[in-house]
Amino acid sequence: MPHTVRATSNPAGIDGQTDQVNVRIERRTHDAARGHAVVATLGQRALAGTDFPLLLEQTVSLVADALNVGSAAVCEVVDGGGLLLRAGHGLNGATAGRTLLDSDPTRFPAAALDCETPLCESPAGPHLDRDPFLVQEGFTNTIAMRIPGRSRPYGLLLICARHDRIYSREDRFFVHAVANVLGAAFERAAMDRDLRRELALYSATVEAAADGIVVTDDSGRVTRFNERAVDMWNPPPEVLASGTVDAWREWAATLGQRPDEMKANYKAALASDDEHAAVIHLKDGRVFERVSRPQRVDGHTVGRVFSFRDITTRLKAEEEHRALERQMLHVQKLESLGVLAGGIAHDFNNLLVSVLGNAGLALAETDPASPARSRLTDIEVAAQRAAELTRQMLAYAGRGRFMVQRLDLSMLVREIVTLLRTVVSRTAEIDIRLANDLPAVEADAAQLRQVVMNLVTNAADAIAGAPGRIEITTGMMSATQDYLARSSIGQDLAPGEFVFVDIADTGCGMDQNTLARIFDPFFTTKVTGRGLGLAAVLGIVRSHRGAILVDSSPGAGTRFRLLLPVVTAASTGQAVPGAPPKVLVSSGTVLIVDDDDGVRTVATLSLERAGFRVVTACDGEEGMTLMQQRGADFDVVLLDMTMPRLSGADTFTLIRQARPELPIVLTSGYTEPEVGSRFTPDQIAGFLQKPFTPATLVRTIQDAAKRRAQEQV
């Protein structure tokens, strides 16, 4: 019964094989379940945000135990090349964070980074050189599993054994699953790192902002503010600790000049769905510009950002710029008006030469008993008054005639006190406070007397006969650049020591519109026919390199302060020509070069009547033609300085070149210092400022002719 025997013996062998299969299946099932549990645990920890280094340590430990290999490691691809050991279990000499494996793709395990399959096994597979790390650790059977990344592998998961170890298909699946979990953990760690970097950059940006920033959420809480906001507002600790918009708003409003307006603006900003701006004026003088914008996420407003910018300095600079522009425009206007006034005065003086000359000639030819003589006298007086008007216009233009000398300002005011009382109503009191031992100033006494008289007259008019007081004060002060910048004239003066005279009244005062025009020629608040007084004051002060400051407001009176620079140099005073002596008959030939017909006519008649022969030219070119034709005949030249085509200065130069010894008398509607500054004193035989009388003309020409005759002897 071999068959039977064989039949009875087979079941025993089959049962044994079946038991072995069942054991292997049970073991694989157990290992698979254990592997699933490990993967699930690691996945949960990765999703829960477990500290990344700790997660790596837990991973290598769990994987080594699950596969019963004794060792496992995670290496990360680092910038610059290499595989940095991040975590290891069961290692002998290697240290996490320090040990660096070679990234050469011809070596194992680095080859797993670029191979077709994500898993490489040593010593199985293609022949590869082994990294010294594996040799030093004594690993014989190793799996290198690529850890996937978004754009490149993050690194390798190493399963290491120091004994013979065969890895099953389930082992490889397990290792693959763990590598995927590590890839997700690396991705999360990278995202967390990027997020922290972005948050740090955001915080650094907010802190680096020049503006103060306060961020609120939609529930009315302050979620963030930078140090600049704290520096600007300096809120107390309890406000910072409260963290509420209401606390910030209520406290900030106490610092503002208009608290209720500030609160209303903040409420309007919080209720707005758009940008909201406001300018905040604080009690301490600072000015903040506040801009509020909504924070929107997915189209929904989740809060607001308030930015505060201190614009105090900017506003001050803008105001200073506007003030400088106003000053420049004012100076330009004054300069333009000065040029206009000087030109008008010059032309008017030419007309007055004709009026005064003809009136003087007519008086000389009229019988003393004639009724016409009084009429001619009235014409002469009116012309003299008109000449005074032109002198005021020249003073405004800064072209008045001065005799500069060293003066004590207090003494000058003291000398005219009696005269001052005659122009002030008896109902007004004059309070004079004069400083002693003031430093000297260089000025023209007559012109300064005119300035003081004009200002006192204005003060008396402002009081208008009512009870009041006029204060006249002298003293010395150090004027800064900022102080001088407030002046009506003299903003360009250098800071330094100045002597001043103040003239203040308790009169009606002036508003800003009036103050802006008080120095304009012919502007007046008085009766018609007045208006050059302050304009002349301005011109005189400007010519003396001084400054004027005016302070006035309606009902509070007016104060004028005149500043003159202190000088230590010797006096540069010039003698004032005395009254012309009696005209004497003379002889000789005079060449008159003047573009004004009236001037030529009067000068010709006056000189011919005195015995001179006269030749006239209507301009410089005609005058030079006559010089070329009969230059040797002329004994004196009367030369106007302002002419068309060839100017008086150019004509003067040409005459001097042709006849160096020929006396030349200059005449002009402008003053002698202005005209004569172009020439040396020995070049000029005399000067006549228009308008001049026939007697003055004849005497000046006579003196020039006599000097020439004496030089020839």
Image (spheres, grey):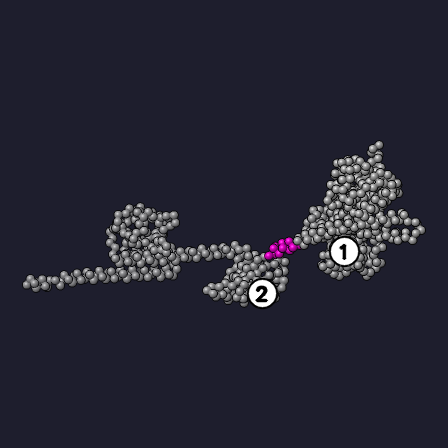
Asked if residue 291 lies left or right of residue 90, the reply is right
Q: Amino acid at mark 1?
A: Phe
Residue 242 visible at all: no
Find residue 522 and name its label. Answer: 1
Asked if residue 690 lies left or right of residue 282, the reply is right
Q: Are marks 1 and 2 in contact (CB under 8 Å)?
A: no
Q: Quadrant of the N terminus?
A: bottom left
Q: Residue at 72% of width from left, 57% of height from top?
A: 516
1 or 2: mark nearer the eye: 1
Residue 206 visible at all: yes
Foreground of the two, 248 or 571: 571
Q: Quadrant of the C terminus?
A: top right
Find residue 265 and name its label. Answer: 2
**What is the total number of numbered labels drawn onto the structure image?**
2
Image coordinates of residue 393 in percent, x first then y, are: 77, 51
Q: Residues within 10 Å of mark 1 (few under 14, many from 20)?
A: some
Asked if residue 216 lies left or right of residue 462, the reply is left
Give the image quarter of residue 642: top right
Image coordinates of residue 542 in percent, x first then y, are: 74, 49
Q: Residues within 10 Å of mark 2 (few under 14, many from 20)?
A: some
Q: Residue at 27% of width from left, 50% of height from top?
A: 122
Image coordinates of residue 536 in percent, x first then y, are: 77, 51
Q: Secondary structure at mark 1?
A: loop
Tell me which secondary structure the magenta stretch mostly adopts.
Answer: helix
Question: Outermost residue, front direction?
Answer: 629
Q: Amino acid at mark 2?
A: Asn
Residue 312 is one of the magenta-drawn residues: yes
Residue 76 is one of the magenta-drawn residues: no
Query: Of label 1 and label 2, which has the lower sequence position?
Result: 2
Foreground of the two, 184 or 673: 673
Magenta span covers which residues?
Answer: 311-323
Q: Residue at 11% of width from left, 62% of height from top?
A: 9
